[in-house]
Image (cartoon, helix red, strand yellow):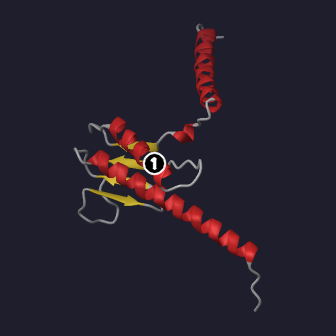
Amino acid sequence: MPRGFYGERLTWVTLLGAVLFLALGMEARGESPRDYPCLHWEIKDGLKVNRQRAERLCEAASKWVEKNVVEGEQRVRPCLTVKVGEPCPDGTNRAACLTLGERMVYLEKWDEFSAGFVAQACLLAVFHEVVVHVAQEIIEEDFRAYLDVY
């Protein structure tokens, strides 16, 4: 057995225990990791990005929709991948774009407007989730209420 094996093992066990403790603590308070902005970041080397501001704005946008648009206690937290330092894949000369189907945000560079664009992308993704959910409810209700005869 290599020297320090138990020390490394103890470190990993402690780390995993801390992660589980935090996850269980959030569930005990009625929260889950899904309650927070689900933003995944892919940042080109050397670029400075204000991730905290973008995440804070995305969370505020999601909470606004929950408060003003969605009925009941429904949580909406879109998952997006934010690619900073990568141009829009359609070849247009835009500073930023969103591919809603893939849930990808492309920002060619990070500037003072970038966090706001991420928040706009979150809003679009949230409204997309709400529209899909409402459409599913309407279709299910129609299915239960009517019998089509051909």
Is residue 85 among what the camera can see? no
Residues 95 and 141: in front is 141
Query: Which quadrant of the figure has residue 31?
Result: top right
Query: In the picture shown, does residue 58 fall above or below 70?
Result: above
129 or 68: nearer the viewer: 68
Secondary element under disc 1, as helix, strand or loop, is: helix
Q: Does residue 69 appear to the left or right of 113 in the view shown?
A: right
Question: Residue extending furthest top?
Answer: 3
Spot occupied by residue 137 in the image (x, y as percentages of width and height) = 64, 65
Instruction: Please give the name of the residue rendered at 53% of the width and 50% of the height, measured from the top-left corner.
Output: 76
Looking at the image, which residue is at 32% across and 59% down? 88
Report the residue at 32% width, 42% height from top: 44
* Amino acid found under the numbered disc labelled 1: Ser
- Residue 99: which quarter of the image? bottom left
146 sits to left or right of 48: right
The one nearer the camera, 116 or 87, is: 116
**Residue 57, image x, y percentages:** 37, 43
Position of the N terminus by quadrant:
top right
Q: Position of residue 63 (x, y in %)?
A: 46, 46
